Image (cartoon, rainbow, N blue to C red):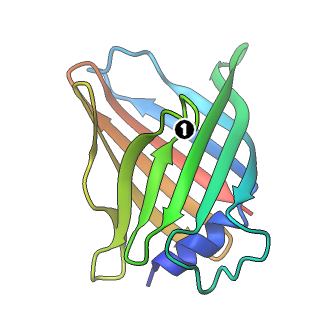
């Protein structure tokens, strides 16, 4: 069974990531490749009991790495996320434009069958973003599915301790 507290515990221990982008033939973005990098973290307080998070607790994760579009071309990449524990959900916000312009992505909830799912998809212009989650003791697999008139992509992220 995957629970929000297990996810919260992982978020407070993760320090590296890798990902693979797969686009089908209908996607016009050209995004195809792999990446990897390191994660830095800032939490809402220094003495965190991750086994019993309080509602409102936050973890900010900052991802820095490289995206390898081809064998001889890589692009520096950076993502900054705010994770907020809400008791019955964990809210994920993208801080791509900074703390003063957060972009709400979705709430992660338990579906009653032991799985973590998004409460709703994230709509960005004409594109729909959805995610699924698989936890293990030392890793989080997060799969993004992006569907839109020009995008048909799957991003498989592996976050690890």
Quadrant of the drawing holding the N terminus: bottom left
Q: Residue at x 65, y 44 (%)?
A: 18
Residue 34 x %, y %: 61, 32
Residue at image position (66%, 50%) is 61
Quadrant assignment for the C terminus: bottom right
Say whether residue 7 is visible: yes
Residue beneath disc 1: 95
Q: Is residue 58 above or below residue 115?
A: above
Q: Where is residue 155 shown, x and y percent of the image?
A: 46, 40
Residue located 71% across and 61% down the image: 14
Residue 136 visible? The answer is no
Q: Is residue 140 left or right of residue 68?
A: left
Query: Which element type, helix, strand or loop, lies under badge 1?
Result: loop
Furthest residue in direction front, as rendered: 100
Percent from the top left, x then y, of residue 108? 38, 63
Image quadrant assignment for residue 77: top right
Position of residue 35 in the picture relative to residue 33 (left or right) = right
127 vs 101, nearest the viewer: 101
Within 10 Å of disc 1 (Cα), the crowding (few <14, some 14-19, many 20+) is some
Q: How many marks?
A: 1
Q: Residue at x 26, y 20 (%)?
A: 26
Q: What x and y, as percent, mark residue 80? A: 61, 40
Given residues 75 and 118, the one toward you in this image is 118
Q: In the image, is residue 127 above or below residue 27?
A: below
């Amino acid at each position: 069974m995957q629970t929000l507290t297990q996810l919260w515990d992982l978020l407070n221990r993760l320090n590296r990531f890798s990902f693979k982008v797969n686009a089908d033939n209908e996607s016009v973005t050209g995004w195809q490749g792999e990446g990897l990098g390191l994660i830095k973290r800032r939490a809402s307080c220094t003495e965190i009991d991750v086994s019993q998070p309080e509602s409102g607790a936050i973890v900010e994760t900052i991802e820095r790495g490289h995206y390898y579009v081809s064998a001889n071309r890589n692009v520096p990449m950076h993502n900054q996320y705010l994770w907020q524990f809400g008791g019955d959900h964990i809210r994920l916000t993208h801080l791509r434009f900074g703390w003063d312009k957060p972009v709400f992505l979705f709430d992660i909830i338990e579906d009653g069958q032991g799985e973590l799912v998004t409460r709703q998809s994230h709509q960005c212009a004409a594109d729909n973003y959805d995610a699924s989650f698989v936890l293990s003791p030392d890793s989080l697999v997060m799969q993004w599915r992006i569907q839109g008139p020009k995008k048909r992509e799957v991003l498989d992220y592996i976050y690890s301790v």
